[in-house]
Image: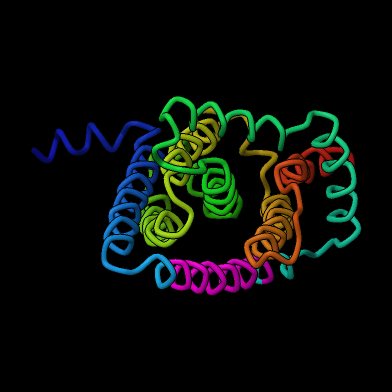
Amino acid sequence: MTELWKSITSISLWGSIVNALMVLAGASFGLLLRSVMKRGAEGGAMQRVSDALMKGLALCVILIGVQGAIKTTNMILVILCIVFGTVIGELCRLEHGMEVLGEKLERATKGRFGEVTRGFVSASLLFCVGSMAIVGALNSGLMRDHTMQYTKGLIDMCVAVVFASTMGFGVLFSSGLILLYQGSITLLATLIAPYLTTYVITEMTAVGSLLIMGLGLNMLGLTKLKIMNHLPAVFLPLLFCLFM
């Protein structure tokens, strides 16, 4: 049994698979909780609870964003990444692409689970942007050490419960993006590790944290930022640092 477990954990993608499964489990429980809340409360009461949860969660999301953003050591680099990343995202119409994907998923499920796009985009951004996602995936690829991905998975699972209970079915699909994003970093670890220095990861996290703050403001209804159109900015510190 011990040998079997060692064989399983020696798979480089194991950490990403576990992380994705934990999000899937958390989102499933959140959807169950959402269903129970709907049956156990009147329509108006349920809406008030949902709105209150959403606003409370939005404040937590903003705090997460602030904590990551203030770690930057190069504000000019962050500004450049946001500017050029936004131009790339707008030209590629990433937000529109995500909306189309969300609409296709809604049609595939015949609309039985409501809006998919908001939960998918919001959860994916929060789960994939951050140093734990990058460093954890690198550790899995280089050393077959999945400890950080297990830890991140536990955190993501708890967040997925709350997200799914308020945003619905779309949060489930974020597990697939986690597997794709972190799995890609793991598989390419030996190639990209020399370039993902502590400095680069810190600046990527800072840029991503700004987007997380924007996500929180959207959740509060204060802004209508097209967060996905800013997403390329997260990866530009890697490119800029090659030439700076």
Judge whether residue 134 can be spotted in this image: no
Report if residue 179 lies within the magenta region: no
Judge whether residue 132 can be spotted in this image: yes
Image position, residue 24 (x, y; %): 35, 44
Q: Image check: 121 left or right of 242?
A: left
Image position, residue 93 (x, y; %): 78, 31
Report if residue 58 lies within the magenta region: yes
Instruction: Report the magenta stretch's main SS.
Output: helix
Nearer-the-camera pick, 41 or 26: 41
Residue sitting at x 76%, y 61%: 223
Coloured how?
Answer: rainbow
Magenta part of the chain: 47-66
Q: How many marks?
A: 0
Q: Image check: 89 left or right of 36?
A: right
Residue sitting at x 57%, y 71%: 55
Q: Furthest residue to the left?
A: 1
Residue sitting at x 37%, y 50%: 27
Asked which quadrant contains residue 9, the reply is top left
Image position, residue 109 (x, y; %): 41, 30
Q: Image check: 159 left or right of 29?
A: right
Image position, residue 110 (x, y; %): 42, 29
Q: Image check: 151 left or right of 61?
A: left
Residue sitting at x 76%, y 53%: 225
Asked which quadrant contains residue 79, the reply is bottom right
Nearer-the-camera pick, 51 or 122: 51
Nearer-the-camera pick, 116 or 203: 116
Quadrant assignment for the C terminus: top right
Quadrant assignment for the N terminus: top left
